[in-house]
Image: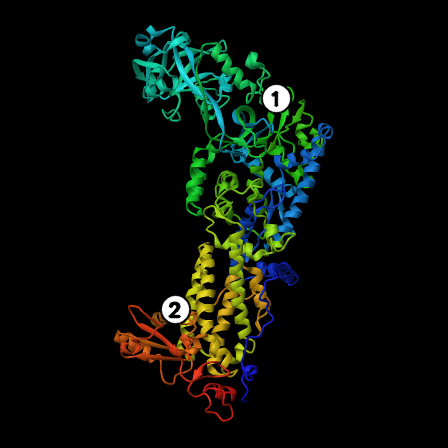
Amino acid sequence: MTEPGQYKDTVNLPKTNFDMRANAIKREPEIQKFWEENNIYSRLSEENPGELFILHDGPPYANGQLHIGHALNKILKDIINRYHLLQGRKIRYVPGWDCHGLPIELKVLQNMKQAERQNLTPLQLRQKAKEFALKTVDEQRESFKRYGIWGDWENPYLTLKPEYEAAQIGVFGEMFLKGYIYRGLKPVHWSPSSKTALAEAELEYPEGHVSRSIYAAFPVQKVAEGLKASLDGFLPELGVAVWTTTPWTIPGNLAVAVNGALEYAVVEVSRKGAEAQRGCRYLIVAAELVDRLAAVLDAELTVKVRFSGKDLEHTTYRHPLFDRESPVVVGGDYITTESGTGLVHTAPGHGQEDYIVGQRYGLPILAPVDDSGNFTDEAGKFAGLNVLGDGNQAIIDALNEAGSLLKEEAYPHKYPYDWRTKKPTIFRATEQWFASVAGFREDALKAIASVRWIPAQGENRITPMIAERSDWCISRQRSWGVPIPVFYDEATGEVLLNAETINHIQAIIAEKGSDAWWELSVEELLPEQYRNNGKTYRRGTDTMDVWFDSGSSWAAVAKQRPELCYPADMYLEGSDQHRGWFQSSLLTSVAVNGIAPYKTVLTHGFVLDENGRKMSKSVGNVVDPQLMIQGGANQKQQPAYGADVLRLWVSSVDYSGDVRLGNNIIKQLADVRNKIRNTARFLLGSLHDFDPQKDAVAFADLPDLDKYMLHRIREVFNEVTEAFDSFQFFRFFQTVQNFCVVDLSNFYLDVAKDRLYISSADAFRRRSCQTVLQIALENLARAIAPVLCHTAEDIWQFIPYKTAYKSVFEAGWVQVNEEWENEDLAEFWDTLRTLRNDVNKVLEQARIEKLIGSSLEAKALIHIPHKQLNDAIKAFNPVSGNGIDELRYLLLTSQVEILDSAKGLQGLKYTAQTEDWTIAIVNADGQKCDRCWNYSTHVGESAEHPLLCERCVPALAGEF
């Protein structure tokens, strides 16, 4: 053969049908079908030999399309579950949905005409709400499955199912019988726009809220005994000065509270002009605030007397708008000198601290505001006005007329809004059902301390929330929910609620569902002994807070289903759930069983856009997970990236804080996925003729390069295992990406091509390389499987030799060997890799300036001044070596010379010098071999193959 190019068919090029493109829109559903048809998840989840691992699902709300936050949450759960499956554990993942509550009710009502709405019975509304919830569950389930989430999708838990509702009634019953649940008139967050009480977790505090704050003076009527001598002289022109950001609560004022430990003063007010004649001449304020108040009120304040807050107790004042006298009381630490006057207007029907202080002093609870947020008749002339509208203005005007208003100003601050209607809420006393956290607070705090929190600051978030929580309002004034199973005596209003009534209703709901509460007669709902006892009962109309619904899932799911366990191994949700599901689950579980429902709690942040802004439809920066997977109408502008790119993003971020996503990030992640695919494709193609049973080389016989590579593989995959064990998935992402690009593509595979392509098929230098490639390929597929589950399976399906496993998930976790560890060898090879990088820089310069085309056209000249290093690297450059552990193969040059002196490098153009060595690049000696493209002085020595070098001639004969 003397014609150039005739040897190309003798080269062992990679062969595989594994596609370079992911083609995810077609391939991922095929892979999911393969899993389903072969029952991969259900078999492994039940038959794995390891112990059970239960990640209990926090139920998303069945109320619309999934967003990117749902994707982050469910994929994190799936990564953890798949990792545990690969580790040989049994996992049972039961997805759940929160199906009751106001948002669903509102959606249903929005879709109806006004006339329809007015004639709607509670049962009709419940039926429509149920249909809406179930339809949404089906839609969300399909989306979750498309993300590649494994779970018991055919048998999820739904909070509207009878068995769930019955278990929830059981939790309520046990808490009631232990004395933790009571009915009381207390101030709660009330939403006039939704006409129901709200839980803390149903509030949001938007930026930009501005309240109308006022300073007002209430005239002092009678001075406390201890202060008579020093203060009586200021009567009747003395007033207590208060400040409030909610003027509409003034009709509910029944006291003014002071801090017993603060110092107070009587100040003389001297105002300019007409203002001087109005209101009280003397005011009681906190001594520390005198200067600030002088500026605020634009008046001269002269201190006349000082005294302690404690001494003010039992002083009385007259309400400026109503004919009543009220006391000055001693409040708590919430009274500070940070704002206001140091005296707090106290309305026990409109504030938590006010209520507590009021209870201590035996004050009544006055809340003259109705469900719609309008003043009631108790508010006198203000009746009918809306407290968040005209009512506020009317109070301010009336105080002004009475000469009580000192100042009005705008006050920007955080204020609670109803998270569904986006309207402000009010604090208002109503008859509600409460769970008294005080009864089991210490146990709850102990339980928190027994849990592993990831990240650790989760514990610091939930602990003060529980420590400071007084009562949990668990009743709602809605139809779509689980009823509070209580009866009231028609004649006396007395409550009927006990073990018999609870058990009776629990049994009815277990059989018929909670609709029975509205469908059956009161007589049927009552146990036998209460049906004819001479009393008439009516059923309660309140339903339970949906946080009580989802917070009972440990009882209704984890404890009730035989394949699960309680407490669960892990709960995993967004960080907002410290005040939501984590808390309601903890409180119910501790109240009933004295333990936390979870052993570990992992929380993640929120998803922001690439610039760190909140995602919103109006801004147009929302990433729709469905669109990202399936692509848009214009696939050029909105390509179909598939679920694996979405999953790769989840693994790449540090979820312990807020995370970012946008088009540029998605493109970068798609590139990383493609890089991993291409690496796998090369590995698959290079193993097309390899049978591990027959062809693998024993570890002891491997050359140093391959032993070093196995050392790196062990390091890399141990690091990956550690990343999964510690839930630091971003470490997995960085390690695998680095391994594919730096260790494999840029180094080992680059060097391996000569061995794989040029040697005869079963030559030692080729088989030893394939031995390493097989280990790298199988471990790479296993390591990416929890995250890039479709890609990993795709790779596994194209493995060209027989494996014992149908699916990558049956193959188990990565397998590395202790004997591969060799730090000394690694240290030497790390030095060689540094040398290689330095040589590459000079080669690149020579290539740019056209001295050479490929690196094989070059000869490297190297001088190493340090004797020890010089000797070691010289030994790695033998005249005739094993065809693997040689510098020319490592550097991809045709020849390498180690020079004893740097003189030989003088005057050469392409050089570089570092602390360790000096490098030069010159043209290679000899001619180019037509088969391997190496340059050699021996080309032409073979009569039969005059175009080939001394390596290719024996390779054709199967000897190299």
Dot 2, crowdedness within 10 Å: few (<14), some or many (≥20)?
A: some
Q: Position of residue 300 (x, y in %)?
A: 33, 14
Label annotation for residue 841 = 2
Quarter of the figure that contains the N terminus: bottom right
Q: Earlier in the sequence, mark 1 or mark 2?
A: 1
Q: Position of residue 581 (x, y in %)?
A: 53, 41
Look at mark 1 in the image and give the residue it sits on: 493
Q: How many marks?
A: 2
Label 2: state its secondary structure: helix
The residue under the point 50% across, 63% down is: 783
739 or 142: which is nearer to us? Answer: 739
Q: Secondary structure at mark 1?
A: loop
Where 205 falls versus 934 (above or below)? above
Q: Residue at x 58, y 22 (%)?
A: 373
Q: Nearer the viewer, residue 407 or 810?
A: 407
Above or below 258: residue 119:
below
